[in-house]
Amino acid sequence: MVIDAGTREARVWDELSRIADPEIPAISLVDLGVIGSVDIDDERVRVRLLPTFIGCPAIGVMQQQITEVVGGMGLAPRVDVEISFDPPWTSERITPNGRERLRLSGFAPPVIAETDGLDELSVLPIAECPYCGSRNTSLDNPFGPTLCRAIYHCADCRQPFEQFKRI
Amino acid sequence: MTAAPPILDTAARAALAELLLSIADDEFVIGFWDSEWTGIAPMLEEDVATSSIAQDEIGHAKAFYELLAELTDDDPDRIAYGRSADAFRHATLLNHSRGDWAFSVARRYLYETADAVRLAALARSSHEPLALLAAKMRREETYHLLHADAWLRRLADGAGRQRLIQAIVRLWPDAQDLFAPLAGEEKLVRDGLLPEPMAVMHRTWQANVRPVLDLVVEALPDAAPSSNGRTRRSEDFAWLHGEMTSVVRSEEAATW
C-alpha cells in the first residue's frame, strides 16, 4: 500500500501533538509552536525544532522525546531533530488551544503583540489573571522559575501567578 | 542549523572565527560571574532574575560556540572548557570579579547596552546562521536591558549611589574594550559578515549611554577601546577559569 507523504506528515504532526512540554506539561509541543516543520523522504524524517529560549535546558529532552516518538512510527530509517531559529520562535506561535491550556493550568498566556518588535512598551506589565480574569495585576518579576516565565500578582483575587513571557 | 553552510574563503573563515569566539567568551564569562549571585543576591526576586539572566547568557555562549565549532570543525565543549585562561578573548570588562551588588549592576548596564548595539548589527550579518541567531537573541536581551536599566536608576537614586559611581568610574575604561578592534576586522566588514566596524558601534554605544551615565557620574572621561582589550587577562579571571573548568578537569576522559 502506498501512503502519500502528506498523510504521513499529518500523522507525525498528530503524534507530536501528544508530546507534552517538559517544563509546562499542560501544553503540547505543537500547541507551544516549537515545531517548525516536518519533512519526510525515504532516508529520514526531519523535524525542525524552534526553541522558545536559546538557553532553554529542556531542548535536549524535547529532541530526545521527538526522536523516540517519531522513530517509533517506522516511517524512515532516521529521525533528525534540527534546532532552528528560522523563523525565530515568538510567543505569537502559541496556538489558541495552547493559550487556553495555559490559562486552565494557572499560567497567563503571553500578551498578543500589536507590533512585531519587542520594545519597552510591549514588555509593559500587562497580564490577565488566569484565576479571576482581572487585569488589575502587577508585574513582580520579569524573570521566573524558568527562562520563559514571569511572575505577577493579582490585586483582586490576591493570587500570585505566572505568565508565559511575551518574546 | 538548517541553512546550508555558507561558502567562505580561508581569510573570512578565520576572521569570523575570531569574532564568534570574542562574543561567545563575553557571554560565557559574564554568565559565570553573574551565576555567583545565585543564593546570595540582596533579595529573593533578584536571586531569581540574576540566575535567569546568567542562564540566558551561558545558553547564548553555547549557541555561539556551536556556530564556531561548525565553522572550524571543533567541539563546542572543548572550546568552552578545554582552553587555557590565556586563550580566552572576552573584553577586559569581564576580567573583574563580581564585586558588590553595585559593581555587578554597573557592569551589567555597561555590558547589556553594548551587547544591544552589537546584536542589532549582527542581525544584519551576511553569515545567515549568525544573523538568525542574533535576531532571536535580541528578543531575549530586551528583558536583560530593561532589568539593567531599572537597577542602574534605582541605585543612582538611592543609598547605593556612591558605590555605583565608584563602580562606573572603575569599569568605564574597560567597558570600551567590548568594541576593541578584531584581527581580520576589515575583511569581516568588507564581506558583510560584520555589518559595521567596531569603531562605528562604539560611537553608537557611547551616544546611547553617555546621557544616562552623565546624570550619575560627574566628568566621566573620554575613553576609547585599547588594541589589546581582548587579550589581557587578570588574576580574577585565572581564578574563575579554574572554577569553571574544575568539574571537567576532575575526570577528563568522562562522558556526561
Image (cartoon, grey):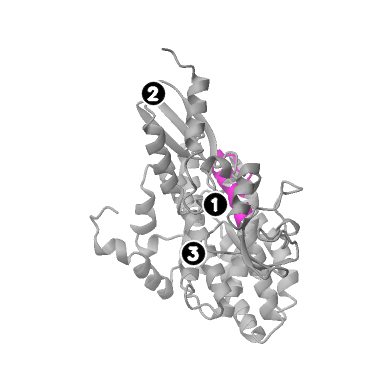
Foreground pick, A133 / A14: A133
Q: Of helix, strand and loop, which one carries label 3?
A: helix
Q: Quadrant of residue B116?
A: bottom right
Q: Of helix, strand and loop, which one carries label 2?
A: loop
Determine if residue B4 is in view: no
- Which of discs 3 and 1 lies nearer the camera? The answer is 1
Pointer 2: residues within 10 angstroms few (<14), some, or many (20+)?
Answer: few
Foreground pick, A48 / A165: A165
Membership of A80 in magenta stretch: no
Per the image, the residue denoted by label 3 is B31
The reply to whether callout 3 and callout 1 are in contact (CB within 8 Å) is no
Per the image, the residue denoted by label 1 is A53
**Identity of the amino acid at label 1?**
Phe
Residue B162 location in percent, x, y?
65, 86
Chain of the residue under label 2: A
Type of secondary structure dominating the magenta stretch: helix
The reply to whether callout 2 and callout 1 are in contact (CB within 8 Å) is no
- Which of discs 2 and 3 lies nearer the camera? The answer is 2
Q: Of helix, strand and loop, which one carries label 1?
A: loop
Pointer 3: residues within 10 angstroms few (<14), some, or many (20+)?
Answer: many
Please provide the residue range marked out in magenta.
B122-140
Q: Quadrant of residue B169?
A: bottom right
Residue A115 location in percent, x, y?
75, 47
For the C terminus of chain B, which image quadrant? bottom left
Chain of the residue under label 3: B
Per the image, the residue denoted by label 2 is A43
Q: Which residue is located at x 73 percent, y 71 percent?
A: B212
**Identity of the amino acid at label 2?**
Glu
Q: Are marks 2 and 3 on the same chain?
A: no
Residue B240 location in percent, x, y?
40, 70
